[in-house]
Amino acid sequence: MDDSLFRALADPTRRRILELLTEKDRTAGEIAEQFPIAFASVSHHLGVLKAANLVATEREGQFIRYRLNTTVFQEVVRYFMTRFGGEPNA
Amino acid sequence: MDDSLFRALADPTRRRILELLTEKDRTAGEIAEQFPIAFASVSHHLGVLKAANLVATEREGQFIRYRLNTTVFQEVVRYFMTRFGGEPNA
DNA sequence: ACAATATTTAGACAATTGTATAAATATCTC
DNA sequence: GAGATATTTATACAATTGTCTAAATATTGT
């Protein structure tokens, strides 16, 4: 399991971004305007999420649209299920 | 979902500690000797895991035994299932 | 080609974090 | 109670991170 994945999930702003993307795909600007921090800061968070493969992007003219990479979330769930989902210890 | 939980999971040493605890409960010393870092550093990590409620402790004489708190892991799985486990977006 | 809009990248800085050593606390044995 | 073992807490420091402003890149429309 990749280290960048858990580091990416460690920040509350990034988790909020992911939750926004569960509702619908959004452009960087649409995402950024939901937060009180600078656009450049949100862009940085988006970069972290993308590096962790939690989101994917597609250019649409001047806009860049972000969407969830649901595959990776399934891997996260599998990680927790297999390692920690079992019966309690002796 | 508590912020301390995700921050606790963000460190690879701490995730390794959790994996060790899936095998069997262990004392702080047994855990610490698995890592190349100082005992005090491992103790710090154990404190973080405990603060996040990912582990619980019980004193056994001079030893302190750590065990997984499986309840919290189920909450983590539920978090990912409910928010990100659904169908892909439009 | 220029100006406007959308987004990222670069550089700087303060806050957080992981690690270390040393000191403190707790338990056990003699 | 003194000494040994187990563990945590305190303090310091280097590395990482989140945020900012300013500059750079990309696209669109005139």
Image (spheres, coloured by chain):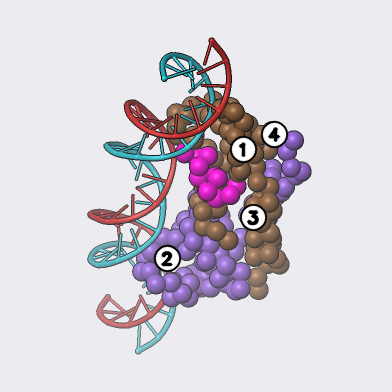
Chain colours: A brown, B purple, C cyan, D red
Marks 1/2 same chain? no
Disc 4: which residue: A23
User: What secondary structure do most residues of the magenta stretch adopt?
Assistant: helix
Residue B20 x %, y %: 55, 71
Q: Is disc 2 surrounded by few (<14), some (14 to 19) or many (20+) residues within 10 Å?
A: many
Chain under disc 2: B
- Residue A3 in the image: above or below residue A89: above
Disc 1: which residue: A58
- The residue positioned 73% from the left and 38% from the top of the image is B89
Mark 1 to mark 2 CA distance (whole Å): 43 Å
Marks 4/1 same chain? yes
Disc 3: which residue: A76
Q: Nearer the viewer, mark 2 or mark 3?
A: 3
- The residue positioned 55% from the left and 50% from the top of the image is A52
Disc 2: which residue: B42
Chain under disc 4: A
Element marked by disc 2: helix
Disc 1 residue type (three-letter): Glu
Q: Nearer the viewer, mark 4 or mark 2?
A: 4
Mark 4 to mark 3 CA distance (whole Å): 20 Å
Label 1 near label 4: C-beta < 8 Å?
no
Query: Considering the image in quadrants, where does the N terminus of chain A appear?
Result: bottom right
Label 3 near label 1: C-beta < 8 Å?
no
Mark 4 vs 3, N-terminal side: 4
- Asked if one can make out residue B77 in the rendered structure from this viewpoint, the answer is no
Residue A45 counted in the magenta span: yes
Mark 4 to mark 1 CA distance (whole Å): 17 Å
Mark 4 vs 1, N-terminal side: 4
Label 3 near label 2: C-beta < 8 Å?
no
